[in-house]
Image (cartoon, rainbow, N blue to C red):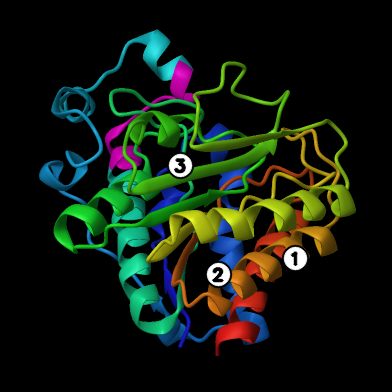
Amino acid sequence: MLKVAYSPIYVYSLPEGHRFPMRKYELLAQQLLYEGTIAEDSFFTPDPFTDEDLGLAHDASYVLKLNNLPLTRDEERNIGFPVRPELIKRGRYIANGSLMCALHAMDHGIAMNIAGGTHHAFTNKGEGFCIFNDFALAARHLKIRHGIKKILIIDLDVHQGNGTAQIFSGDADIFTFSMHGERNYPLRKTKSDLDIGLPDKCTDDFYLKILMDVLPSVIESHRPEIALYIAGVDVLQSDKLGRLSLTREGCKKRDRYVFSLCKKNAIPVAVSMGGGYSHKISDIVEAHANTFRVAQELYF
């Protein structure tokens, strides 16, 4: 059974101005249930991470600052929205959801977080709509508390995973691979183990050829015990914050390739949704739903 991390707090804790793009979490869950891709008992609600849990990837001083709000205007501007206790709690749920997905994937081959992909959060600050870095936290927990030594983070969001790169700089066990729009946010990239910056208006064929040329060699050289995959759909041509030109079918082929390669190499994969900001929310939901449909088709 495909296990999916979900909690309604993902939607209802958001400031009013940010509800439209983030309603995708609620609508995605409804769509997947309606069409029968997943069943009610596929969903699980994680417990929130404690301060100690967060400390495996974030500085204690940063966690304390979040607990003792408010942040400064500059700090909130960097994050992108007013930070309040409900949003911090939301981040705690999402982070543990990604960890639990990774643990479920170890048993079932794959598991999905209906949110996550908060790759712009650094050890000591939030940035780019990200407060805590869910996959960085999951990777550290897997390594320190679960004995998983070799971890691969596959970040295919349109934005470079700068926070993840910073957190794992110098950690040879956790390989960070980011394939993103070169001219997109963040303006100043933080060096991952492997960064591939793509040109504006990059199309399906160009994108997929590069991914297929590179990812097998990354897997061969690093030999991960698990992969953590950010399946952002902000690579779509319709995305208002991206600069690439993938179609929904191209995005689906991307997911199929990543999953098929991981399955072929017996690598469990935990998946988070990452970004998606198309003008029509139906385009976002449909593209994210394809990720779940492909996972269900290939694994169950």
Position of 265 relative to 237 (above/below) = below
The disc labelled 2 sits on which kind of residue? Ala
Q: Earlier in the sequence, mark 1 or mark 3?
A: 3
**Residue 133 colored magenta?**
no
Q: Which residue is mark 2?
A: 29
Label 1 crowd (10 A; few <14 / some 14-19 / many >=20): many
Asked which secondary structure carries label 3, the reply is: loop
Asked which secondary structure carries label 2, the reply is: helix
Label annotation for residue 252: 1
* Residue 32 percent coordinates (x, y): 61, 76
Label 3 crowd (10 A; few <14 / some 14-19 / many >=20): many
Asked which secondary structure carries label 1, the reply is: helix
Q: Looking at the image, is mark 1 or mark 2 nearer the viewer?
A: 1
The disc labelled 1 sits on which kind of residue? Lys
Horizontal side of 212 relative to 133 (left or right) equals right
Query: In the rendered image, which quarter is residue 66 located in?
Result: top left
Horizontal side of 149 relative to 178 (left or right) equals left
Q: Earlier in the sequence, mark 3 or mark 2?
A: 2
* Residue 235 percent coordinates (x, y): 74, 45
Label annotation for residue 118: 3
Quadrant including the C terminus:
bottom right
* Residue 75 percent coordinates (x, y): 38, 15
Label annotation for residue 216: none
